[in-house]
Image (spheres, rainbow, N blue to C red):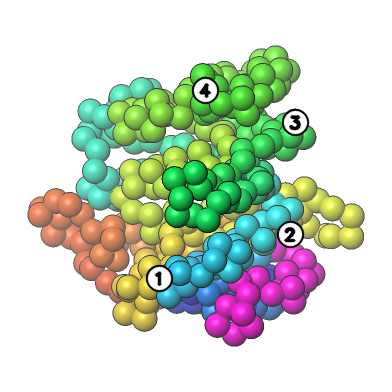
């Protein structure tokens, strides 16, 4: 099979880690008989430097012609003084809206190899996970194209007088909420059958709307244990007893914050992949999908062979699974990553916090990725 993938390396460490994900996809393609054709595109800070805007029309048009999109990272201090509509991050919002990807899947699980990189105590990790061992495995389903990031915004006044103000509006339609809840309930059904809506329904009208609609849908999903939690409590519970969660579904801004918090519990934000998915539309062979590691562009370590490539590589595995239904190929990449971690190799961000971890070897981006490729080569097709 032939697949067309839009490739947006972006800024900072984006090109470094994305190139390793491409290597993994090409090797998986060779092993399992697929051809992946990559269309490299500009977005983010590099596009600002090149053409004066974060998301050129040509980039979005080309991405829409591909079967899926793989992104590295965008942004950096170089562009922080630009007005909001010209910031690199606007490229992310534009791609998500333009591609129609509305549900962001961010898995966060503690791999046993990285137990010492997790900042939580054993008794905290053991609490509420029903397994009696230090572990957690949760999925955050974040609404991606609505809410405060896309709502009406602006400023009143000259910005200097006491009466000057700024505003950003949180607004959700029933259709936006229902479609992401369907994704979340499907995910819960395929996992451990638990779904928690995270909101701020004691204060926000938009959150009360989320809760009303979730209660309606819960009545149609009696096989799923549905619960509700305020976002401030959830942020506390993630560090008090993360094992209690299976699927968390929430709004755009809450999901953005909580998923970054959850990433720290896994040992490093450099380990977390993500998938942004949409509906299958007429004229497209595959449902729209955008895949990216959740870490930022980290310009301070760009070009130093320090960045962890595993989140980007695991994002490629999520692409194989969610866009192309290539489960065996996705699993092969994940097994290769696990085998590499089993061998004791670590980038600096996932190095053990314990001084007794003598079996670990700290390596750079290139050596870590090369080890994953070697492990992938050894996995039978």
Between 341 and 287, the one nearer to me in the picture: 287
Measured Cα–Cα span from mark 4 to mark 3:
19 Å
Look at the image and give the residue range highlighted in magenta. Answer: 47-68
Which residue is nearer to you in this view: 105 or 130? 105
Q: Which residue is mark 4?
A: 203
The x and y percentages for residue 367 are 34, 76
Label whose residue precedes the other's in the sequence (2 or 1): 1
The CA distance from mark 3 to mark 2 is 20 Å
The answer to whether residue 269 is above or below residue 169 is: below
Alpha-carbon span between mark 2 and mark 1 = 26 Å
Query: In the figure, 120 relative to 48: above or below?
Result: above
Q: Nearer the viewer, residue 17 or 252?
A: 252
Cα separation, mark 3 vs mark 1, equals 37 Å
Q: Give the label on residue 98, or none.
A: 2
How many C-alpha atoms fall within 10 Å of the one at disc 3: few (<14), some, or many (≥20)? few
Q: Which mark is residue 77?
A: 1
Secondary structure of the residue carrying tag 4 is loop
Q: Position of residue 357 (x, y in %)?
A: 15, 55
Label 1 SS: helix
């Amino acid at each position: 099979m032939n697949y067309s993938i839009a490739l947006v390396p972006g800024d900072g460490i984006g090109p470094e880690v994305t190139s390793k994900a491409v290597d993994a996809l090409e090797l998986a393609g060779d092993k399992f008989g697929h051809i992946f054709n990559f269309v490299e595109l500009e977005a983010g800070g590099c596009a600002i430097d090149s053409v004066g805007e974060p998301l050129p029309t040509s980039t979005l048009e080309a991405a829409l012609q591909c079967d899926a999109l793989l992104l590295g990272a965008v942004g950096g201090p170089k562009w922080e003084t630009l007005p909001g509509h010209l910031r690199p991050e606007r490229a992310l919002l534009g791609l998500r809206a333009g591609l129609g990807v509305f549900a962001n899947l961010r898995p966060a699980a503690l791999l046993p190899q990285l137990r010492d990189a997790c900042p939580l105590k054993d008794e905290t990790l053991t609490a509420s996970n029903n397994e009696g061992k230090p572990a957690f495995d949760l999925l955050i389903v974040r609404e991606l194209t609505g809410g405060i990031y896309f709502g009406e915004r602006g400023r009143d006044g000259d910005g200097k007088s006491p009466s000057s103000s700024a505003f950003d509006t949180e607004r959700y339609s029933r259709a936006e909420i229902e479609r992401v809840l369907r994704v979340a309930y499907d995910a819960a059904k395929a996992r451990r059958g638990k779904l928690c809506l995270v909101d701020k329904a004691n204060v926000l009208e938009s959150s009360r709307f989320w809760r009303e609609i979730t209660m309606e849908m819960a009545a149609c999903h009696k096989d799923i244990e549905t619960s509700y939690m305020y976002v401030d409590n959830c942020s506390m519970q993630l560090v008090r007893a993360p094992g209690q969660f299976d699927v968390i579904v929430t709004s755009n801004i809450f999901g953005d914050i909580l998923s970054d918090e959850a990433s720290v519990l896994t040992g490093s934000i450099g380990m977390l992949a993500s998938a942004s998915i949409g509906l299958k539309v007429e004229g497209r062979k595959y449902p729209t999908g955008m895949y990216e590691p959740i870490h930022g562009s980290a310009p301070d370590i760009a070009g130093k062979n320090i960045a962890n490539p595993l989140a980007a590589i695991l994002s490629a595995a999520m692409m194989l699974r969610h866009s192309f239904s290539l489960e065996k190929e996705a699993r092969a990449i994940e097994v290769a990553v696990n085998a590499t971690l089993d061998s004791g190799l670590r980038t600096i961000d996932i190095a053990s916090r314990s001084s007794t971890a003598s079996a670990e070897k700290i390596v750079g981006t290139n050596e870590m990725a090369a080890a994953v490729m070697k492990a992938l080569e050894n996995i039978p097709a």
